[in-house]
């Protein structure tokens, strides 16, 4: 009997966003909101890495004017990407970084 291979949660998410690309924007918004709260760079990079795979690393690299390896390195678990790289990757995925006023600073 063939051994059944289990998929990871990331693989399931990746498949979902391939089938539902209209939901990527909401997902990214939540990822950045969570990052604003907990500053977990590895979690943010993991989410961006998954969406980059959904959209195609090679395509993202070409549009961001980076190498494929450069995109993978920037979004790796050990990644410490420069702001301009993240901005370029986000734009290549079809999104931009827009500041939003935090509620705790709303009166300022």
Image (cartoon, helix red, strand yellow):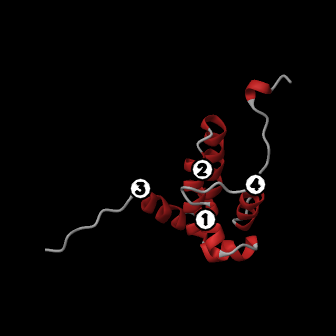
Q: Which residue in the structure is indicated by mark 1? A: 73
Measured along the vertical axis of the image, is residue 15 above or below residue 41? below
Mark 3–mark 2 distance (CA, rounded to whole Å):
15 Å
* Structural crowding at the residue carrying mark 2, measured as other residues with C-alpha within 10 Å and reported as few (<14), some (14–19) or many (≥20): some
Label located before the other in sequence (3 or 2): 3
Quadrant the N terminus occupies: bottom left
The reply, left or right, for residue 36 in relation to residue 99 is left
* Structural crowding at the residue carrying mark 3, measured as other residues with C-alpha within 10 Å and reported as few (<14), some (14–19) or many (≥20): few
Mark 4–mark 2 distance (CA, rounded to whole Å):
13 Å
The reply, left or right, for residue 40 in relation to residue 99 is left
Q: Which residue in the structure is indicated by mark 3? A: 9
Q: What element carries label 4?
A: helix
Residue 55's image quarter? bottom right
Q: Which residue in the structure is indicated by mark 4? A: 83
Q: Are marks 4 and 3 in contact (CB under 8 Å)?
A: no
Residue 47's image quarter? bottom right
Measured along the vertical axis of the image, is residue 67 above or below residue 13? below
Q: What element carries label 2?
A: helix
Q: Which residue is drawn at 75% across and 54% down?
A: 83
Mark 2–mark 1 distance (CA, rounded to whole Å):
14 Å
Q: Which of marks 3 and 1 is in front?
A: 1
Q: Nearer the viewer, mark 3 or mark 2?
A: 2
Mark 4–mark 1 distance (CA, rounded to whole Å):
14 Å
Front residue of 81 and 4: 81
Q: Which residue in the structure is indicated by mark 2? A: 44
Q: Which of marks 4 and 2 is in front?
A: 4
Q: Is mark 3 on a helix, strand or loop?
A: helix
């Amino acid at each position: 009997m063939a051994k059944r291979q289990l998929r990871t949660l990331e693989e399931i998410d990746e498949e979902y966003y391939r089938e539902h690309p209209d939901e990527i924007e909401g997902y990214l918004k939540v990822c950045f909101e969570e990052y604003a709260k907990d500053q977990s760079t590895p979690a943010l990079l993991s989410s961006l890495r998954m969406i980059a795979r959904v959209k195609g690393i090679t395509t993202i690299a070409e549009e961001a004017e980076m190498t494929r390896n450069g995109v993978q390195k920037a979004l790796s678990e050990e990644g410490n990407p420069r702001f301009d790289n993240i901005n370029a990757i986000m734009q290549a995925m079809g999104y931009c970084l827009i500041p939003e006023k935090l509620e705790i600073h709303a009166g300022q």
